[in-house]
Image (spheres, grey):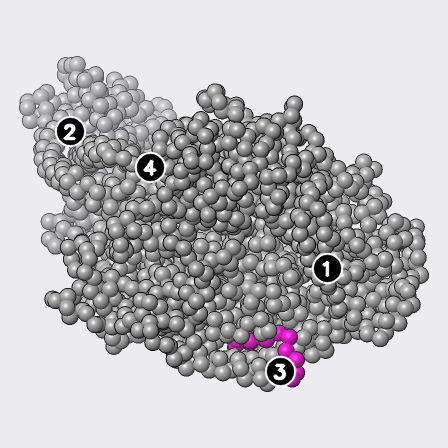
Amino acid sequence: MDDDNDKRSASQAHSSKGDQTDWTEDSDDDLYHSIISDNGEDYMDVEDSPPQDDARDLIQSIEGMYRVLDLINEQGSGGLVDKIIIAQDSLRAFTNTICPGAYVSMTKVKFSVLDGLIVKPVGVYGSKEEIARLLLSLGIVDDNIAAQLVMNHSETNVSKPSLRSGLYIVRTNCEATSDEQVFVVYWPEDATWDDSAPSSVKRNRVTFMRYLTTMCDQIMALVSPEHARSIVWIGQEDKDTVMEMDKDEDEPDRMFTFEVRKTNEQEEAVNTRPGFKATSIHIAMPQPHPEAPEDYSLHKPRLLHGETNQGFMNINYLPARRITDVWRRRPITHLQLGDWLRSDRLQMKENLDANAVHLLLGAGLRDCFPQLCEQWQQESADISSNTRATKASTEASIKTKLENDLPLLTRIFHRELVDAIVKKFPTFTHDSFPCPHQSERGDPVAQADGSSPHPTESEQASPETQDQLSNIVKLYPEIEKEFRHTLQKLRTEKINSRDFKNYKQRVYIAKSLLRQFPDIEMEDEDFLDVILHEDMRHVKESVRMLGKHAMHRQPKGLMTQAWSSINSFISSGQGSQFVDKTFKDAEAAASMISDTQFLAGLDDMEELLVMKKVVAGTRAAALAHFRSLLTTQTTTLTHASMRIQIDESVAQVHRQAAISEEQQLAESRKGFIVDINAHSQTGHHSHALLIDAIEDGRGYHYAASQVQITGSRESFEESKLECTVYPMQLTAQDLHSLQSDASTIPSPKFRNSFSFLLPLGHSVVRAQLLAGEKILLATSDRFGNLTVYLERLTVIEGVLAHGGRGKKLNRDKIGEFVLAFDESKRVLSIVATEKLFLHIFVFDDTLGFQANGSAINLTQWYPEGTSINHACFICGGEELLLVDTLAQARVYSLTTMQFRPATLNLIQIPTAVYSTPDGSCLITAHVRGSGLELTAYHWSTFGPTDGIPLEIPDLPSDQPLLLTSITSRNIVHLVTLDIDTRSCRSIALDITRKVTEFTFKEKGARGGNVKSESVTAHNCLIDCHAEVWTRFPVLPAVQRETITSSSKRCQRTLIFVTDLDHHTFVSHFHDLVLTFERMSKKPTGNLLKRITVSAMAHSTFHHGHLDGAEWSVSKFRAGEWLAEFLCLIPIQIAVTKENRFIPLKDGVYSTELEKSLLGADVNRIVDYVSFGWYESLFQSYMAKKPVKVVSSMGEQSVGKSFSLNHLVDTSFAGSAMRTTEGVWMSVTPTKDVLVVALDFEGVHSIERSTQEDTLLVLFNTAISNLVLFRNNFALSRDITGLFQSFQSSATVLDPAANPSLFQSTLAIIIKDVVDSDKADITKEFALKFQKIVQDEQEVNFISRLHAGQLNIIPWPVIESQEFYSLFPALKRRLDKQKLTHSTAGEFLHTVKTLMAKLKANDWGALSQSMASHRAQILLARLPNALAFGLQEVHPDPEPLKNLDDDVPIDMPDTSSEFSLAGGLLSPSREAALQVLSRAWGDYDSRHHMLEDLWIENLLTHINSLVDLRIAHVHEWISSNVARFQSGQASIDELMRTFESATVDLKSNLQLCKLKCGSCELLCVQSRLHDGQHDCHTSHDCVHSCDFCVSSGEMKACSMSAGHPGYHICIVNAHLCGQVCKLFGRQGCLEECMKVIGHVEDDHLCATTIHSCGQPCDLSKLRLGDGSPCRGTCSIPSDVNHDRHLCDARLCSFPCQLCKRLCANTDHLHGLEDGTIHLCGEEHSCSMQCTAEGICEIETAPQSIEATFTGRHETFQYTKYSQVAKRLRCTKSIPPGLVAHEGRHNHSLDQRVVHFCRAKCDHCGYYCTLPLGHPQQEHETRHGSMSSSRWAVDGPDDTGLEVEGRRFSSNDEGAPMMCNLVCQALGRHVHIDYCRAEDAASCIGNNEAQHIFKRLLPHPDRPKDFLTHNLFWRRSGFKDPYSREEQTNFAKCDAMCSGPEHTAAEGNAAQPFFCTLPLFHIPMDPNTAPATLGYVSNDGHFFSCRNPVVMQQAFHV
């Protein structure tokens, strides 16, 4: 324990000093320590158990050496005991070194992966020097470390680096290989190989050798020359001894001779000798603190008084501080939170959200502040109402304003679009495109050709207009997108006007002709007119004629000739090539110049008169095109922008309204919270609750009754003094040695610590340690008033903190005083030193310190002015020594009330006086110089003697001494503290009285310090094997088969490596085997004889085995070998304390974990319980194997562990000193099953309550298949009492409700029965059990706990042949037992759930709890299962498995990842959908097949993947819940959740299938996507032009993807290309796709439908902050329609019953009044069950830490309450309906019932029987009696002691439980209100008696005494107590006053009660009884001896 441990954490006001380790739920990797003490606290040995990174531990300096088993100390019931544990960190390092990643944590070891490696272990044990020599030769250590290894640390007090005893693995090769050679080294203690070593060392030696010989087939014993020389070989003993052994071979081991020896009579004497020395780092001066008072330095360590117990105390100053327990999302029950809300000063964060406030209201805030809560809720409702009204009016005004601004918006967009056109075509001006609104107002209009006669300012866009547009775009960014999109539609770079293109083509034909025929004169207007204006057929004919006559040079009159002959040549083909070439050249020339450049060049052409008309026509055509386009796009853009403005403005209004509402609500909440906080400040509160955040605890890992709170709970602590008591403890070995030899000098240790706090100004007047870890503590306050306590050390802190019972004395009345206390009589004397009054108080367990009469006036014996300086009791008597200021010592008798005649006149007033604990001497202390001088005076010769001076040098004069005794009052030690050396030293005092003493002692060689000459020094180096064979089985009945046949094992060998006596080792070992087999009678199967034994010198061994030589070593799979090793180590899985069953996490008890689990439900406790290294075996490595459980119970020290070891080959460390505490588990793997062995502590222990025994028995009988109950028949035949705990357990858990439990056979083993007694003993037991069955009938424990199966086995005496022959019979019985755990995983789940239920006091059906936990696990893993097909994703992927056998679910599945994201906007959903789509093999075939077919195939692909995943997950769930009964609510809820999740999964994968916003393909986003529709392609057609392909050219199609019609590169190159007459309509492809020169007048593009394009009517509605639809009308624009409907064919509103979209095919049906939106799927009903009765009673009670404040004391206790729940309806709502038919019901199973509504009036627990049950009485399990009050007969302050707590009338009964209080009271009466109209009718009633006095509570209401039976009949509930207890309660509670029944020193009281009924008529005391006994004077009959006859005369 280091100094830092004195510091307290911020989360705990104070903790025991032993509470050093912060164990958390993730403590798998911590060093496994099970540091458990009987008093309920956890402590750690601070000196002998250093942390792993301690520099003193040599293992840190040795590379390649790993500690796997460690030796530590822990507190046991008989003192400090050694314990062998697994060194987790070191074992992890070794495992991960040979196979990285194989050891994840203690509970997750990958044994299967390790099986891929081979290990070749060689065991090594022997002398330290030789092991160090081996390590040195292997290169593992260097010379320096080797020297440190062999140093004997027992001979020095200096702490130096050392290697703790344990089992180590040494790797010889640092490189990881598949074939690993390792040495398993047993490093011994210093005294391990001494034959005379202490028993604890011997026990450790045997246990380590057991592990070593089991782990390794090849063993090396390294024997040093020193050890070898001291070995006594068989055959060297005295021949006479051998002959004597031949005569009676059992005598030396089995016969022990004792004698009663009279000690020599001696004179009175006191001799001194050196005693013990114990060190502690806490024996030091306290560190100064700047805030400490000046006298703080006086608080140096002090020895505590104690006649039989020793210790010291430190006092430290603790400055004032605020104690804060900080939480982050800590789960808290509603019950606990409500309790804090009522009791604490609240400081809630002002910004708590609404959900947090509502949670607080529901948890109890409404009840605490009803008026404030009502005002706030009304204010919140008003805010919401006003917000709705304001929002509606604002929305209407915004729409009106925007509609009024429509003309302005039109002008702005018109101007901007004109700017774009003018910018591209400077030929035009702004006036060329007048705004329609300007025209209507008479604005100037441009000329027809677009030119303006008088240019104006309007030719440029005004800055004002540009600013207006910028402002609009800033406000509505979506408008900018629409504007950009509109500019794209304008296509200003290209003029798609037929007339314009015609003019352009003619101009370039003319230019082409002029270029070919330069001599054609431009004045030839006729020719040009034809080219520029005539029909194209005439143009072609003219060009053909021109080409034909070109060679004849006839330019003149050309056109005349052409016109004249045009008709004759029109049909001829002559000159067609010239025409084609001319047109193609013109087309090429026209395509080379853009329309913009062409229009700009018209100015030059206009200079030619003949071209003027063409130029004007061209400009007019272009202007007409842009005007038409401008009008359409301006209108479309304006309306689209208007829609965006309205949508976003309304959404903004909604947002602002919501923000405003939330701000107002937040301000309201803030004010409400401020008011609550302010109101909470009034009054006194011990704690402050700070709440920063609070969330609902609903989810996978928390119960619905919990919330998760972030914040803190704090209290302010004033400056205090922390007093820490360090009791001195002896090891079990020291205790045993002192009992054998009183002269033994022990080696005590200071391990534990207990602390308590005192306010500043208070002080400790006296502190005295008492037996049973109790303390007498006298404290004084700042006024000098005295308070005296006598309490257990574990509770003294709470007693002081909560004002527990203590005797308070006023300093003013006492004056100055001295204290004295006698431990044996528990008498306290307070001597008023100046007033000379003696106050005597006697401690009573029930009443505390009570004054023993009036104060005794001593003034008559002392002259005036005399005062008393010292006082002490004569130990064991009733006499008090008083030393006055006259230096006179006198003895006052409390019996005679007189002083002894003799007076001892001392030389001077002593500094201190002491009475020896054995009651023999007085010792006085005087100061002599700088030291002390001690003088002893025997009480028997008190007065006349001069005393015996004690020669003890160097006694400090400034330190008080302690005169005490160790283990026995005769072993007296004088103890001092040496702060400089931090040690506690003693001087042993051998006191001789002038009397004759007798001792009982072993005669001869055994005992004392005398040793037999035949005892050897180091034979145990060989004999240790025989010790292992003796204590553990050689050939067990159930044999381990962890190592499979595939492993290569070699012959077992044992090599002794030594340089002496090689030839004798082998013969000695063989003789050892023969002797063992002959003496023990154990079956060995020749296993021992087959061991190959050899011996060799070190040099031979080194050359033959260490120099790279191959030698025969067994090869093991690493996983199997490690599993075999781990299965050898038992783990503690549970303890019982304070009437509670406490499961351990990985074998460790932690107070912090216990605190965190307070109020936890069963599921959370199950997750917390862990079995350490066995977890991986049960969960994975051996998960498929079935399990059988065999357990051992019985009385203490009857060989329970020994029997289990020999039956199932376990290593439970039983011994004569009881070390089994709680429940320990070990596993024996066999070929077919895993045999789990449970070793239980002895029942009926004085350290365990009846309830704790009951809980242990309940756990044992529930889980086991075979229960071995051993008892010592020779010691007790009270079979009924012995099996009381079994019978008590029979009524707790109902076997009918738990068919998988209570299937064991009970085997009663009666130990040490000889053959002649077998029949009689069996008959006697059978008759006893027959009586139990007759008395208990259907509730007898044999039927309920063991299915009626019981065996009685009279077991032979040990070391007889028959003793071991019965173990195979037990094995056969185990084999025949019904298999209740089909897999190891199932067993693990069952046992954890059972333990959790016992801890939570949950007495409901196990299957229900298991199903609930399994459903919780599956629910937690369901998202991973559906999304990834894995049950764990991180850190390592883990496939879906059966959790019971760890077998993966063999189902086909996809590796694809699915999204489970909900809501309309989910990027993860869209990303996952795209990954799934692109993973489809035919994804790229989209452009080469019909879009609808491609979409259908894609959906088929996606659905097939989804179906695989859903089927896989469904099979995973089914396999994991198959073993649970149908009708389990949690399983049904799991299936509903799964079905709902699958529907959501499929919904996420539904494709939108509407047209892409950028092309003609369909959208492949999910149906729930947001934003523009997207096909996720380039939107460009990938095909080649159909027209060009026919001519051999490959030009890409310029159309958008998925377009209808031909693929075409340039439309007007092959087709008409004129602007579609419906240009600008939705879906228009803009260019006419008809043939060139088509006859029809209308130009139409290839699209089939030109949509209306107006907003869909559904967009008028609101959904949240937006519109349910943003699409535009897809109805053809040429079709008259009243409703605008977009492409969507399904409703866009969400389903009213779930989050999916409505499945109605009418997209607009949401416009109808009263529309119902449903998704078309089946839904789970969300309503609660409405059937009569209660759906479910939470069988696990909710528990909180509550404070009891009574008249006499205040204390903390665990309060239990129960919750009755209404479950959710399990009926399904059919598709298309909003509700199902019939009433809501939580189950469709007719067998599932609703429970009765009756509640216990006292605890509020509900009846657990079905509604309308036929039973006359209700039944329940009962909890805290919150509705009851105590009524105690007597004055108002009369107290009643119950289980160490004191209650008075009107105190609340909550600390007690209905089903336990009567048991705690014993025989008792109940008090109830009188039901009779006249009190006279209650007289003479044998079940009720009227009370004629006034009693609290409600003293005015008359009350009756009731019998226990009538009380429970009136309650209407079944009596929860056993029939035996009921019979006892029905009897009179009067007790015999005989002194033999009272508590004597070291023994509990044994009260004797009246045998008559409770309200019996008094018997006549003068009538002689017919049977043995007597009648008391008040008419009670007792069947014991009359105490009046036995008592001596009394003088009154």
Occupied quadrant, residue 495: top left
Residue located 43% across and 65% down the image: 1987
- How packed mark 4 is, by other alpha carbons closer than 10 Å (few <14, some 14-19, many 20 or more), is some
Region in magenta: 1296-1318
Q: Which mark is residue 1317?
A: 3
Residue located 66% across and 80% down the image: 1314
Look at the numbered discs 4 and 2 and tell me whether their residues touch, using CB distance below 8 Å: no
Look at the numbered discs 4 and 3 and tell me whether their residues touch, using CB distance below 8 Å: no
Quadrant location of the C terminus in the rendered image = bottom left
- Distance from disc 1 to disc 4, alpha carbons, whole Å, reads 66 Å
Q: Which element carries disc 2, helix, strand or loop?
A: helix
Q: Amino acid at mark 4?
A: His
Residue under label 2, please give it. Answer: 410
Q: Which residue is at the front of the view, 1032 or 414?
A: 1032
Residue under label 1, please give it. Answer: 261
* 1343 on left or right of 1025: left
Q: Amino acid at mark 3?
A: Asp
Residue located 26% across and 57% down the image: 1833
Say whether disc 1 or disc 3 marks the residue closer to the N-terminus.
1
Q: Which residue is at the front of the view, 256 or 1633?
A: 256
Say whether disc 3 or disc 2 marks the residue closer to the N-terminus.
2
Q: Which element carries disc 3, helix, strand or loop?
A: helix
Q: Which mark is residue 687?
A: 4
Magenta segment includes 1312: yes
Say whether disc 4 or disc 3 marks the residue closer to the N-terminus.
4
Look at the numbered discs 1 and 4 and tell me whether their residues touch, using CB distance below 8 Å: no
Q: Amino acid at mark 2?
A: Thr
- The residue most toward the left is 441
Residue 1343 seen in render: no
* 1647 on left or right of 328: left
